[in-house]
Amino acid sequence: MRRSGPNDGDFSGRYRAPRVLVPPGVAEEEQKLQESVLRSFGSRAGRPAGLERFEQMVLRPSDFVGDGPLVGTFCNFVPEEIVEAAGAVPVRLCTGSIVAQSIAEQVLPRDACPVARASFGAVVGGLGMAPHVKALVLPAACDAKRRLGELLRDHVPVIALSIPGRSDHRTELGYWLSELGRLAQKLAEITGRTPTRARLRDAIMRRRAVQDAFRELERARRDSPHVLTGSDLAMVAAASFHADPLRWADACGQLAAEVREAGRDGPLTDGAIPLVMTGAPLLWPAWKLYRVIEEVGASVVADTLCSATQRLYDPVQVDDWSRSGMMRALALRYFSASLCPCFVDSTAHADRVIELAREWQAAGVVAHNLRLCQLFQIQSARLRHILRDEGIPFLAIDTELGPEDVEQIRVRVEAFLEMVKEQGRTQ
Amino acid sequence: MRPIGTVRWVVQILAFCLIIYGGYVFRGSLGKGILRPLEAPDGSYSTTRLPRSSIAWAPGDKPAMDFYPPGGACRFNPGGGLFKACIIHMVSENLTWQTPLKYLTVYLFLFVLLAFLVGRAWCGWVCPLGTMGDLLNALRRRFYVDRVNFSQGFRKTLRICSYAILLPTLAVSAAIGTPTFSPYQCYLFLPYCQICPGRLLCPLFGGRSSTVADFTNGVTSFFTIASWIVLGLFVAAFFLGRRIWCHLCPIGLVTSWFNRGCPTELRKDPLKCNQCAACSDACPMGLDHVAREKEATVLNDAGCILCLRCVDACPREDCLSLTFAGKRLLRSKYEATH
């Protein structure tokens, strides 16, 4: 796994990162973890059959990935169209695996962000698609990710993307565009294919199938929001991390048709309390929050998670099909459209949460606050205040990836739902 | 992919043909008796009475209708055009002629009414100069050359320049109407028209050509060369900078006074906006308040030509919409490409 490279411009090669010993049997352990999580979700009656394809994509990503050299990505900030235009196949390596997290603990402190630890562990431990990637694109969106690059570059070539502190297109677009230009150039050096205008155009048109299919699914769900549960939607999104966009879009289109069909026969699991989920990503397979919510009779109908809706919702809206025009459209899509709390202004995030709660007639909003991620934790303090003024019930769950606190979470979610029902009765 | 944009092209081309060629088709059949033509008093110059070699000389054709709508209807249209002229022409001409206000009231009232109803949509959907510019813009896009992006400060400067064109135009026109300066009428009549690119471009689309050069003396040479420079800037601005020119246009400036408070409104539901700025990328006037706004729901702005490219570009259902007198006419929606 250890690769030594010349100074690549992003990081100095003078010092070495600590070695990581991969314990034997982690791959099997990871497989077991994923299968057990899947079993806990897959047994619901009336679950659309179309979800099986997504489960396959999540469990056996290498069967569904596109052809070409793989380039790993972290976060939601990496324009996958640029990776594709450079002749590579983007695979998102973010994970919530506690197996991966335990590998990282040899190097990273226990007080580091759990997602950063797990994703780091997956790369150095060679889990999932990580051993196959030729390079890794790492947006420095938060403190943890900013520091990971130096540790990872001894394992795989890392291209770092610097994210401006505010998402204002007027002041920051130029800088962000220069970062994307550098990304295109670095990728071209690795793959030998320059992202030309025609290639960028093809990639944008191809990737657009993802948003088309996801919006179609969203329209289908509108009439019958409970045919799919929050975890089903998360499965659909998790599959898109690795799967070829056209195959994913095809599966998503079929699922949308099935949801529409099921909606015609009347709602299947009517009675589930609709909730909106916001906060830190709920990355596969760390889905205990979905499980608890579904087990106590609620369901996430909409979310702002970069592991789910935020990954699939926003299209690249090209105004000018020149190369720089397309780069600008990509820059706006992956930057201005983002609701990430790493930016100084989170008005758009609060607006989206309120809007989703109204649009889906949600009974309340649940914030997933990943412990040790200050960005989400502090944001949730303000959000609580905002939502109280709007009269929308709000519950913040501060947790990590492991299953230790499932019962505590269950108690809190149950109490929250009781309160919501009580409010519903008195109104 | 962009449905409103397609409709707009159709409207623009139709309006272009009507305004430019309407004189040939409708002359003599419209406007008789409804709108009394404004005529130059004895001893004054009018475009038809100027010598042929003067650059403000217009081919003698009568327009189909003696009417001055917002947007770039031009006195120099071949065949007289459908309408008589633009508002700048009308005001300049009548200041020089010292036409009594009572004769102008009906024209001014109609202008204000039309400008008030739809604001600068005249610029975005009707003005033939804008349509020519959009064709130049389409040509650039065809070659996959990216546009030049101008700063907000530059746009503001252009608006100030626009006033710096409008006010001297009116002052000069009024001055040469007085007995003291009346000898200069032959040089300074319609001072803005003399440098306006519309005067040179509109006749190109018909059988008549206007006077492109007059070097009889210093004043006429100045206007001749200035008009060439302005034409060059016009073509370059529209080819490279989308509608940047329209921030400078004095006709657009006058129409823009009615943009706020008019019943045609560009609206936004701020809750639905995640500030992706697809609208500001699509805006040919280069405005970014549509993306930036997080509180107000009415987004009418002096610079907005209501082309509705932002509504087309917005990928969020119902976030942006166009309303007339509170009634929603158009709204943004996600357009699937596959």
Image: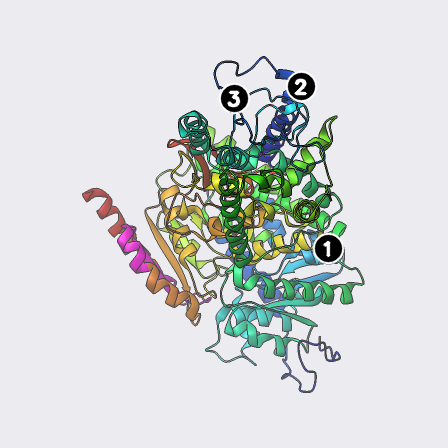
Residue B197, disc: none
Tell me the distance, in whole angstroms, between the alpha carbons under discs 1 and 2.
Answer: 53 Å
Q: How many marks?
A: 3
Q: Does dot 2 land on a helix, a strand or a loop?
A: helix
Note whether B152 is above or below B57 in the view shown.
below
Query: Residue type at mark 1?
Result: Ala
Residue B5 seen anywhere in this rendered image of the structure: yes
Q: Residues within 10 Å of mark 1 (few under 14, many from 20)?
A: many
Tell me the distance, in whole angstroms, between the alpha carbons under discs 3 and 1.
Answer: 63 Å
Chain under disc 3: B
In the image, is residue A408 part of the stretch drawn in magenta?
Answer: yes
Relative horizontal placement of residue A365, taking residue A218 as reference (left or right): left
Observer-nearest of A311 and A355: A355
Q: Residues within 10 Å of mark 2 (few under 14, many from 20)?
A: some
What is the residue that sits farthest to the bottom in this orientation? A15
Residue segment shown in magenta: A384-409
Observer-nearest of B265 and A388: B265
Q: Does dot 1 land on a helix, a strand or a loop?
A: helix
Q: Quadrant of residue A24?
A: bottom right
Note whether B108 is above or below B139 in the view shown.
above
Q: Are marks 1 and 2 in contact (CB under 8 Å)?
A: no
Query: Which residue is disc 1 drawn over?
Result: A85
Query: Residue type at mark 3?
Result: Pro
Query: Which residue is disc 3 drawn over?
Result: B37
Residue A121 on image: x %, y %: 58, 72
Q: How is the image coloured?
A: rainbow
Note whether B322 is above or below A406 in the view shown.
above
Query: Which residue is disc 2 drawn over?
Result: B24
Observer-nearest of B4 and B65: B65
Mark toward the viewer: 3 or 2? 3
Mark toward the viewer: 1 or 2? 2
